[in-house]
Image (tube, helix red, strand yellow):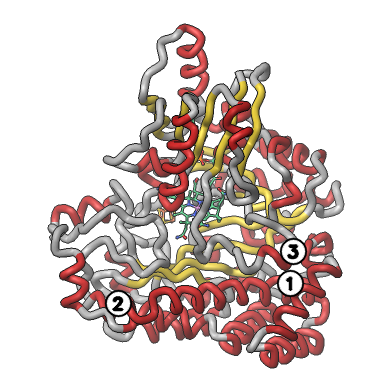
Amino acid sequence: MKVLLINPEFPDTYWSFRHALPFEGKRSALPPLGLLTVSSLLPKSWERRLIDLNVRSLRSSDIEWADMVMATAMLVQKDSLKRVIQRCKATGKRVVVGGPYVSTTLDELPEADHIFVGEAETTLPEFVDDLRRGTTRRTYQAAGRPPLSITPVPDFGIADLKLYSGMSVQYSRGCPFNCEFCDIIEIYGRVPRTKSNQQMLTELDTLRDLGWHGTVFIVDDNFIGNKKNVRRLLPELADWQKRHGYPFTMITEASVNLAEDEPLLDSMRSAGFRRVFLGIETPIEESLKEAQKSQNRGNLLDSVKKIQSYGIEVMAGFIVGFDNDPEDIFERQIKFIRESAIPLAMVGILSALPDTQLWRRLKQEGRLLNESSGNNTNCQINFVPKMDPARLITGYQSIMRTIYESSEYYQRALDSLKRTTQNSSEPNRFGIFSGTAAFIRIALKLGVLDRERKEFWRYLAHILVENRHRLVEGLRLAAMGYHFRKLNDDMANESGDVIGEVSEEKWIEKYAGFL
Ligand code: B12
Ligand code: SF4
């Protein structure tokens, strides 16, 4: 059996990093870990090839080679997935689809032969047996959530590692919290399941054996969801890093209550964690209550500073559009982002993802409009907000314009570098940005060709004077800032008039059918 594993294309979003990746000569941020895991679950005798449409195109010869096509997708990849399915079905191939999009979509399932809902550790082996017996079904849904002890080491070898800026590994699935808008707890549950320490170290060994060094993203929904197990993992991870000369810079996602646990922060620092993505969402207490985000209690600014004091850069998600958002929400978000020195602030408009608690409440209140596009940064609102929608969109855009304006962004980056002072054993020495080629590309693009070049040189001068040993980090942040600014420019050019002049009447007219 020859299996073609396909990751559909991502649209250009804040998370695509399209304008930053070329600086380091990369094509995509991370490989599709779901498909690498699926590949490992298939019988060893089957041949497999990975086509990630974010790093190269799908050729007719790829499809002709295959007996069967297996594709994954998030909601944002839906359109590309549809095109992939059409092409493959047109040549008579059996098409199998799984991943977060089909696992959460309630209607409008793609025209594939087989749909996998949820995690595939138990259902894929069942499908392989059914194929042999000729008794396959259209839908495969696991009866429960599998323990991660049965998850095999992902088939990292089928990806062309050099085309990616980081590698992903997963330690846990699920999160113990109960945020109203969150689909993670619907897909992966509220009881965080983890791999064993040995499984994790084997995955890292595998990556190292394949020649990888640099960024490793632990793509957990909440890395500290199961604190007891994480506490046991971190010392072993730190040992592993030390034994191998700190080959990996670790990044992960965690809930804000990480700040309350200093021993845990200390262990994370020792294990080489240098960046963490937090779900801060909003500095407004009433909105946090509405979102059932009780773990974001206390002074959020102090929490961010605490984490930064452990040498860990904070990235964070922010949301506007809660029912309890006050009129000055936009200014307050800007102020918070500025004071917290979070360079990479992912701000989005609240989006009701399929079958979440938020989705169910809005449906009951008759406020749901349509399916979410899955991209909460594209100014589309899929429910009737309490605030005038036109004001919400323009307010949202004013946040994005302000926080990614050059001088504002560079100042946050400088503040972040200052607050995340690290000791000399930091594992950044293999950072790809340290390459001369990357430096020349950044200097040429941001320091010569870019209209904001003065700000760039001012920023660089500050780093050289105050934080010389953080130059590599500083350049990485400059490249990321450029991506966000370019994307803002592109979006303003595309939608400027429409969104600039959007009025409540126009908005209601557009969605009248749904209302
Ligand atoms: C890493 C990650 C990313 C990476 C991308 C990595 C990549 N190249 O795929 C980055 C950071 C770029 C990213 C970006 C975004 N992401 Co993201 N991301 C994740 C995260 C944290 C981990 C994904 C992962 O590797 N999981 C590990 C693998 C093993 O799990 P899995 O993919 O679910 O695979 C299992 C099953 O689903 C199944 N399966 C999967 N595929 C297939 C295929 C077949 C054929 C079969 C049989 C089975 C199968 O088998 C696997 C083993 O059980 C998930 C959360 C999560 N827990 O998964 C969110 C998640 C996938 N992301 C999400 C979102 C919304 C986004 C963004 C749209 C965010 C935004 N607002 O802009 C962007 C979109 C990307 C873009 N460029 O625009 C949502 C998707 C929701 C949905 N219903 O579609 C998730 C679930 C997070 C969330 N809170 O909801 N993301
Ligand atoms: S903390 Fe994050 S992953 Fe956990 S329930 Fe809330 S939004 Fe979901």
Secondary structure at numbered mark 2: helix
Q: Is residue 466 left or right of residue 392?
A: right
Q: Residue at x 64, y 59 (%)?
A: 263
Q: Are the two marked residues, 2 and 1, in contact with CB atoms closer than 8 angstroms?
A: no
| Position of 37 relative to 226 (above/below) | above
Residue position for label 2: 392
Question: Separation of disc 2 and disc 1 at Cα?
Answer: 34 Å
- Mark 1: which amino acid? Glu
- Between 149 and 112, the residue placed more toward the observer is 112
| Position of 431 relative to 121 (above/below) | below
Q: Of label 2 and label 1, which has the lower sequence position?
A: 2
| Position of 334 relative to 53 (above/below) | below
- Mark 3: which amino acid? Glu
Q: Position of residue 38 (x, y in %)?
A: 56, 31
Quadrant of the rendered structure where residue 445 is?
bottom right
* Quadrant location, the N terminus: top right
Q: Which residue is drawn at 47% across and 28% down?
A: 95
Which circle, 3 or 2, is nearer the viewer?
Answer: 3
Q: Position of residue 187 (x, y in %)?
A: 39, 41
Q: Which residue is drawn at 50% across and 42% down?
A: 173
Residue position for label 3: 24
Quadrant of the rendered structure where residue 468 is?
bottom right
Residue position for label 1: 473
Q: Where is residue 430 in the image (x, y as percent from the top left)?
A: 82, 60
Q: Position of residue 163 (x, y in %)?
A: 71, 51
- Mark 2: which amino acid? Leu
Which circle, 2 or 1, is nearer the viewer?
Answer: 2
